[in-house]
Image: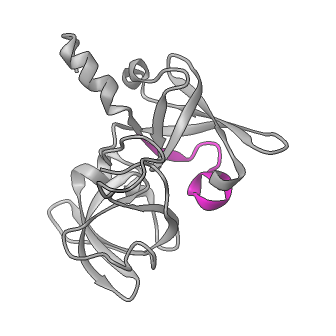
Amino acid sequence: MFTGIVEELGEIVRSTETGDDSALVAIRGPLVTSDARHGDSIAVNGVCLTVVDVDGGVFTADVMGETLRRTALGALRPGDPVNLERAAALNSRLGGHLVQGHVDGVGEVVAREPAAQWETVRFRLPAELSRYVVEKGSITVDGVSLTVAEVGDDWFTVGLIPTTLKLTVLGDKQVGDPVNLEVDVLAKYVERLMGGAR
């Protein structure tokens, strides 16, 4: 479980195909690896990955083909920056919202509107996810917990403050770039309990 508060910007070091539709990905992240051990969970652009090995500030993780196909991780190349967050501890503050690291779909940057102190960004999302997104609700974009400003049938907007623009990959995303989306898990549970389809 994560909170969507990015701890550091890491970097993809290499991605090696391991056969059977999977890859071993190496990611540089000195902060998140400072206490990481084999089996720990680290969110990479919002995708929960399990640490296989740690060596000098770089950790490796196995990434299954399912993850490569259903997230934007497959589009990353060596040198690309990534948002990193260690799993939340039970005694830590919940600065964002409850984030599982289980990506629901891939969205796309549609527009960016700079303002004096922040930026409004519009994202396209798969239409089947829009029912879980509400104005002033929470959504995770590339691992960043954000508050929805507006929502439509297949889009939503958020406001990015200077800290988010500077310290996460969202500051450099361009129109057309893919992003990992995770909707609020509470909305999915409510739908299930109320008898809705999923």
Q: Please tell me which residue is depicted at 17% across the width and 68% down the height of the picture.
A: 19
Q: Please tell me which residue is depicted at 34% across the width and 43% down the height of the picture.
A: 103
In the foreground, 116 or 121: 116
Q: Please tell me which residue is depicted at 64% across the width and 43% down the height of the picture.
A: 175
Q: Residue furthest top?
A: 195
Image location (x, y in percent) of residue 87: 32, 59
The part of the chain drawn in magenta is 165-181
Q: Please tell me which residue is depicted at 19% across the width and 69% down the height of the picture.
A: 39
178 sits to left or right of 70: right
From the image, which quarter does the C terminus lie in?
Answer: top left
Q: Is residue 126 inside the magenta stretch?
A: no
17 sits to left or right of 56: left
Q: Residue furthest front?
A: 91
In the foreground, 182 or 69: 182
Q: Residue furthest right?
A: 116
Specify the color scheme: one colour
Residue 88 is drawn in which quadrant? bottom left
Image location (x, y in percent) of residue 156: 56, 27
Q: Is residue 171 visible?
A: no
**176 over 74 or under it: above or below:** above
Q: Residue furthest left?
A: 20
In the foreground, 8 or 173: 8
In the foreground, 90 or 6: 90
